[in-house]
Image (spheres, rainbow, N blue to C red):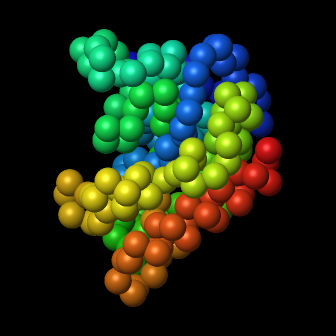
Amino acid sequence: MEYPFWKLREWTPDLPEGRVDNIYIHWSAHDYRSVFPAYHFCVALDDDGDIIVVNTHDVRENMRNVYDAPDEPYAAHTRKRNSFALGISVMGMQDSKPGDFGPYPLTPELIDALCLVAAKLASRYGVPVDAEHIMTHAEAGLLDGYFGTEPQQRWDIARLQPDLRPLVPQDALDAGEELRLRIRRFS
């Protein structure tokens, strides 16, 4: 399936009116080019290695309480947090562990692109750039009791760089704060 996409520098989204209360930030745990419709926007690389923004899901489908009609389409990006919420993801981190980010690690350029996308979405929908309204999946996992590296747990994005010490909840909080700081810089 083909999705609309733009080079990052050309991305000026035509976003519909509607209510958005939260933005959740993820990584895909795949390669840099594979995009997934669990998110609204994916930051990926094209065949030339340029950063692109891919619109994988209609944002209007999450501008409602999705649990009132769960059989209707919506982007299911963050467990029990999809109503009035957008999910954005950087493609990468396949085969990663907290101490080794694998063959598709986060890069400063991809992180900045993700933060730029978040900043544009936050500005458009009036979403405050704070820990209550914009958070990583790891931070949501902390709040909802499923943070970690086990198969049903989430640690995206709990670290921006690999570190051999054991993963701890503070890592998720620190990474979330660093991402929000970068988002504010683009606002």
Expressed as whole percent of the image width and height from the top left, the position of residue 54 reads 55, 30
* Location of residue 163 in the rendering, given as x and y in whole percent from the top left corner: 45, 81
Q: Please, is residue 185 above or below residue 40 in the view?
A: below
Image side of residue 17 versus residue 95, left or right = right
* Vertical side of 57 occupied by 141: above or below: below
- What is the residue that sits farthest to the left in this orientation? 151
Decide which of 87, 63 is in the foreground and name it.
63
Relative depth, front residue between 28 and 175: 175
- Height in image: 22 above or below 141? above
- Residue 94 in view here: no
* Quarter placement of the C terminus: top right
The answer to whether residue 130 is seen in the rendering is yes
- Give the image quarter of residue 64: top left
* Left or right placement of residue 109 versus residue 81 in this view: right
The residue located at (30%, 17%) in the rendering is 68
Q: Residue at x 24, y 15 (%)?
A: 71
Please tell me whether residue 1 is drawn above or below residue 176 in the rendered image: above
Tell me which residue sits at (58%, 22%) in the image: 19
Q: Residue furthest bottom?
A: 165
Q: Looking at the rendering, which quadrant does residue 151 occupy?
A: bottom left
- Looking at the image, which is closer to me, 46 or 89? 89
Indicate the position of residue 1 as horizontal and vertical percent values: 39, 19
Q: Quadrant of residue 14?
A: top right
Point 48% across, 37% down: residue: 87
